[in-house]
Image: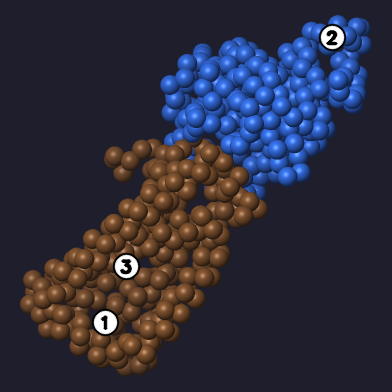
Amino acid sequence: MGKLSPEVTALYRLHRRSLREMLRRHLLFGVAILLGAMLLAGRSPAYVFPLYACFLLLGVPFFAVTSLGTDRADGTLEFLCGLPVRGRQLALGRLLALLEGCALTGLFTAAGIMIFLANRLGPWPVLSSALAGFIGASLLMLASGAFLLWLALRFRPETVAAVLPLGLLAVVFILRPFAPSLSGMWSGFLALEGWLLPILGGVAALSALHALLSFHLLSRAFDRCVHDPSRARVSSR
Amino acid sequence: MSFQGVSAAPRAPDGGSGTPEIALDGFGVTFPTFRFAPLTLTVAPGDRIALLGANGAGKSTLMRALGGFLPQYEGSIQVDGAEVRDLLPGYRRRVGLLPEKLIGTPSATVAERLDFLAAFHPSWDSTYAAELLSALELSASARIGTLSKGMALKFSFVAAEAFRPPILLLDEPTSGLDPVVRRIFLSLLREILGRVPARTLLFSTHILEDVEAFAERVWVLRAGSMVEDISISRLRSQAGGGGLSSVLCEAIEQPPSD
């Protein structure tokens, strides 16, 4: 944490504590449940990697929202906004704490890619795809986390936590008739081969842009709370 | 009680020098159910002001405004000539606020919360904080969420004082303390203020003895209006040979002169 200011370091450590606890529980129960399901279904335990990556893709941004909701409910958010601190520092502290979850998602994604492509492609495309998968998934999580944090700060965290899964379900329901079968998707994925790396790179680049924009929005929202800490109260909404 | 640890002049790490002058010019606030009438006055460096008034008179509102915690107000609050809202968040490094209620990080211990706060105040003195904790007999391992009202007050005082801010704003600092701790607290505060006379103290209280002990000036608020701004020496001369309590009670109860 050499180059971080003492304020950001303190905020990062504070948020990391609660997020790490959530992540630990999620990892323990998520992996155990998936492993049990794979064994019961007679499938390879290796499926756990990509499946758990999918779990994390949904879980990690929600940890951020849940943590913000808890902080608002117990007064921590108002306390933090009353400190001599800038909105940018508050936003940075929260997003840095989210990085562990993002990196874990990236790791599971990379492991999933490596396991499934190992027998189909050469070592270099597998490694480079895994690396791109790691960076892409991590940045995607960071961008989603930052955007959801902004939504949760701008609106009610519980509204965001309730509306977003419903929105995702609605999208899945609407797109279902047009979506190919799982096996079709898988063969399509394998057919990409040469395109896999540019696609993952594109995801990473877009996610980085999204993360930057969300960070900017989040910083401004926190700045408003710093100028008026009562905005961070549950009752102020 | 002997208390060591208060060093010389307070520092102002945000670039400000020493204790600032605070000037309110037509300051007022309008909430849906409460209005603070326009107020013009100046708080000079080193002023010791007691804020009196019934519950809901506007004491905490005024204190929050002076601490830079109230963003929307009419008129102006100037600190050394600059509008307070333009000085945020750095101005908060010059103000130690003991709030009405302790909030946030309920699962953290007293020591953890103080360590956390240290990161935000370059002039934070951990040794001094430990000495204050010890003087107030507050356990560093107690959890914030489990502190009683009196313990929360003691903790809030340590958190407000450990970086030696030039301005101390104490919202009813002795209201939940038992007589013994109250005596220790008052003695500690007297010692702290005695060593650095330039520091400004503004405190609200319902305990008239505290006013006599610390204030040089008294502001009396009633229903969002300041009805009295009077020096203690003048109050004493008004009281004649009697105690200040009866004069103060009269000031709180009587209707505005205009």
Residue appearing at x 49%, y 28% in the figure: B87
- Label 3: how many residues lie within 10 Å, few (<14), some (14-19) or many (20+)? many
Nearest to N terminus: mark 3 or mark 1? 1
Question: Mark 2 and 1 residues: CB-CB less than 8 Å, in contact?
Answer: no
Numbered label attached to residue B236: 2
SS for dot 3: helix
Residue under pointer 3: A105
Residue B147, compared with residue A117, is above or below; it is above
- Label 2: how many residues lie within 10 Å, few (<14), some (14-19) or many (20+)? some
Q: Which chain has been coloured brown in this picture?
A: A
- Label 1: how many residues lie within 10 Å, few (<14), some (14-19) or many (20+)? some
Q: Chain of mark 2?
A: B
Residue appearing at x 91%, y 7% in the figure: B241
Q: CA distance from mark 2 to mark 1?
A: 84 Å
Identify the image quadrant of residue A128. Answer: bottom left
Q: Position of residue A142 (x, y in %)?
A: 34, 59
Q: CA distance from mark 2 to mark 3?
A: 71 Å
Numbered label attached to residue B155: none
Residue under pointer 1: A46
Chain B representation colour:
blue
Q: How is the image coloured?
A: by chain
SS for dot 1: helix
